[in-house]
Amino acid sequence: MTAFAALHHRPGRPLLLPNAWDHASAAALSAAGYTAIGTTSLGVAAAAGLPDGAAATRAETVRLARRLGRDGFLLSVDAESGFSDDPEEVAALAVELAQAGAVGVNLEDGRADGTLAPSAVHAAKIAAVKAAAPGLFVNARTDTYWAGSRDPGPETVRRLEAYQRAGADGVFVPGLADPVAIAGLVGRLAVPLNILWTPTGPSFVELAALGVARVSLGSLLYRSALAAAVATAAAVAAGGAVGPVPGYAEIQALSGE
């Protein structure tokens, strides 16, 4: 078991995975004590002026992984759906990410049009990645709760079981917030369950009590940073006070150069 995988097997102590979108955000999180950091595909895409979930940011994702993979923390990369429906191309991407220093990868079955890829296609990607980069922790995400179904539960179970059989090291169900459904999944899965934290869902402490192994923040930090930037500009324009912010030297020091 790798050091990153071990963080998913601590009963009652879920891995809280914050998600960065560039070197500075990752360095700041690392300096704050987070030993494992993910990337957010929305943040990476939006920062580059590209759409998220549309297989448009392969180059930006690999470039960021190469920069962050040498920074001393455990890096998990949000690779959307692998930027391809060809399992061999997704496996080649996984090898690139592993060589860059990533220890984990997040692969989703949601498509840009809001539909879901066939579970067999996604399972084939997972199997190909595990064959090509066996040390890479594959977090297999299903977007069943974001696909608009009135009863996503049965389809979620079917997909997660298929992804387990394909070799996924963990599974991720963003949008799932019902405590009973979360506990039910934990009880029937053989791999760690990852849940996306939301303001209206269970708290981190409550998720821990339910048996969740990993809690991701997704694009929350990126969206919060944008909101803070706009709010700060508005406060200055209104003649108001601006809260404490890091100084120039402090941010300069994050470069590590």
Image (cartoon, rainbow, N blue to C red):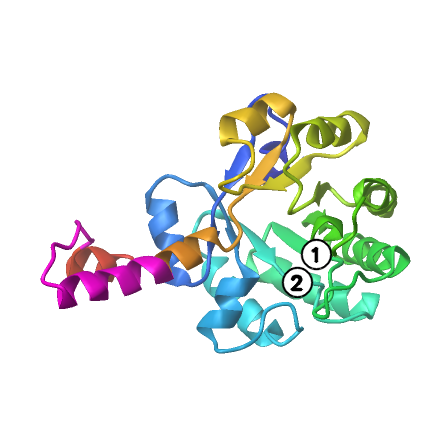
- 158 left or right of 240 in image: right
Picture coordinates of residue 113, whole percent (x, y)? 73, 70
- 61 left or right of 93 in image: left
Disc 2 to disc 1: CB gap under 8 Å:
yes
Magenta range is 226-246
Question: In this view of the protein, which residue sits in the foreground, 178 or 165?
Answer: 178
Q: For numbered disc 1, what is the local secondary structure?
A: strand
Q: Quadrant of the N terminus?
A: top right
* Residue at the spot of label 2: 80
- Callout 2, which amino acid? Glu
- Callout 1, which amino acid? Leu
| Residue 10 appears in view | yes
Disc with the residue nearer the chain's start (2 vs 1) = 2
* Residue at the spot of label 1: 107
Residue at image position (58%, 21%) is: 12
Question: In this view of the protein, which residue sits in the foreground, 125 or 18?
Answer: 18
